[in-house]
Amino acid sequence: MFKTDIYINRRNALRSLIPSGVVLFLGHVESPVNYAGNTYRFRQDSNFLYFFGLNIPQLAGVIDIEEGTDCIYGNDLDIEDIIWNGDLPSMEQLAAQVGISSVSPYRDLRIKLTSAIRKGRKIHFAPPYRGDSKIILSDLLGLRIGELSNYSSKKLIKSIVQLRSEKEPCEIEEIERACDTGYEMHTLAMRLCKPGIFEYQITGAMEGIAGAANGMPSFPSIQSQNSEILHNHNHNNVLQSGKMLVTDAGAETYMGYASDFTRTVPVDGKFTAKQLDIYNIVLAANNLAQEIAKPGVFYYEVHIAAAKVITEGLKSVGLMKGNVDDAVQCGAHALFFPHGLGHMMGLDVHDMEDLGEKYVGYDDEIERSTQFGTAYLRLGRRLKKNFVLTVEPGIYFIPALINKWKSEKINSSFIDFRKVGEYIDFGGIRLEDNIVITDEGCRRLGKKRIPITQEEVEQEMSK
Ligand code: GLY
Ligand code: MN
């Protein structure tokens, strides 16, 4: 847990942004896997963690703006809990760790909210995304489950986004810890990768590193020799000579902060010339993005600049043609780069996505594009100092998409479909780093960059 003042300051900052009402943060309850007593590892709601810090199930935090009070609702352990799960400090002692002196039993939350509702006071809550939380909120607030999101507070959403977007030094340190674990995960994956091994053998060993660092993977690892599939969670293949293995994985620290890296390596340990041509285009796009990301620049512009590097590169190998600026404006690059350049990262790997990407990645200055490809860009707005984000360009040869564009002649003046046919079994390449925006540019997070050049990757794989 961070120092007590961190949580007090965050709640005070929130209070200064919300003019009136009662702000409710519902913590998570345990989540069963296949029967009630067999639960997933507990993961607290990130907004609750941010303002109330306690990583314990079945708590709620309430900030009463007019009264100027912060209260935690939760129960002390009973003798059964202590016998089976061990003792914990009292709720009062736990609450004191995050600067709160007012503690009430969980059942009193209903009394507090009912009284506020009767007085016509606004209850601010963020849109719930877990089934349990929806049921609890629906019951407490007397709203139908389907209506909850409509009644969630835009003021609260925007205030949380404002506060959580600019990371504090203690958060950056924690994210960097997650990045260092990510380094160990990815370099192990590189060393284990070889023909004949099952993908899941690598996935399991790699995810164990996150556990051994007292955390867990920050999302289900994406790892596959079918590297053109953007989010593949199936790891059942035996690695084949000639393929490339994509690994998109990161760690979450004990405190809940994430890293998220992608590397793509040749299963054989050495790139072919054809693989390397495409690989180096993706690497150039990644490097350029890190050169130009700085405060004041729209991340949308960085995305477009990366798309131009990709288009230029694909032109040089004969896969694309025509004017690069025109091609990117028409979205022709999205045949090969059909996703966004990156997203915010923090307590969530896609930070604050529960609050709505239009609030996290876009604002009054910039709306999300509707064009295929760029529409998947989660972060388009102007960058600010201490934003933490990912840089993850890619080039993929997705047979179904290629066949669709070819038969429908989509962007055919910019694409050489005959040449693309020579790459139909190529797979895909994505290279992802994590950065923090600094005064004048950005800094890559983690003590060392995960091997990324041809030489570095081949050397790591030979170990
Ligand atoms: N790491 C997966 C993603 O960013 O979507
Ligand atoms: Mn990512």
Image (cartoon, helix red, strand yellow):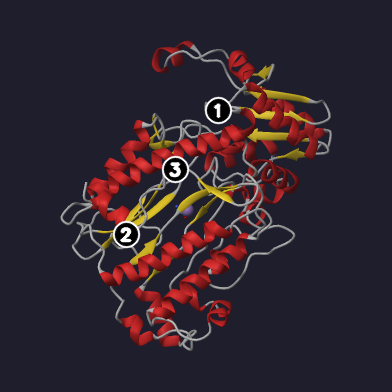
Give the SS element for disc 2: helix
Discs 1, 3 touching: Cβ within 8 Å:
no
Q: Is residue 111 left or right of residue 449?
A: right
Please provide percent x and percent y for residue 227. 33, 62
Of residues 337 and 78, the one nearer the viewer is: 337
Count neighbours of disc 3 (C-alpha within 10 A) and say few if under 14, some if 14 to 19, many if 20 or more.
Answer: many
| Mark 1 vs mark 3, CA separation in Å | 22 Å
Query: Looking at the image, is mark 1 or mark 3 earlier in the sequence?
Result: 1
Q: Is residue 266 left or right of residue 103?
A: left
Q: Which residue is mark 3?
A: 218
For image coordinates 82% across by 25% down, the residue present is: 67
The kind of residue tagged 2 is Gln
> Amino acid type of disc 1?
Gln
Q: Earlier in the sequence, mark 1 or mark 2?
A: 1
Residue 294 in the image, given as x and y percentages of width and height: 62, 54
Image label count: 3
Instruction: Say which of marks 1 and 3 sits in front.
Output: 3
Identify the residue at image location x=62%, y=36%: 168
**Residue 180 in the image, given as x and y percentages of width and height:** 42, 39
Q: Quadrant of residue 2?
A: top right
- Residue 377 lies, in percent from the top left, at 56, 62
Report the Cα–Cα distance between label 1 and label 2: 49 Å
- Packing grade of label 1 (10 A; few <14, some 14-19, many >=20) is some
Q: Which image quarter holds the N terminus? A: top right
Name the disc covering residue 454, or none. Answer: 2
Q: Are marks 1 and 2 in contact (CB under 8 Å)?
A: no
Mark 1 element type:
loop
Residue at 24 percent across and 51 percent down: it is: 461
Left or right of 192 in this view: 387: right
**Residue assigned mark 1:** 58
Q: Is residue 203 visible?
A: no
Residue at x 64% of width, y 16% of height: 96
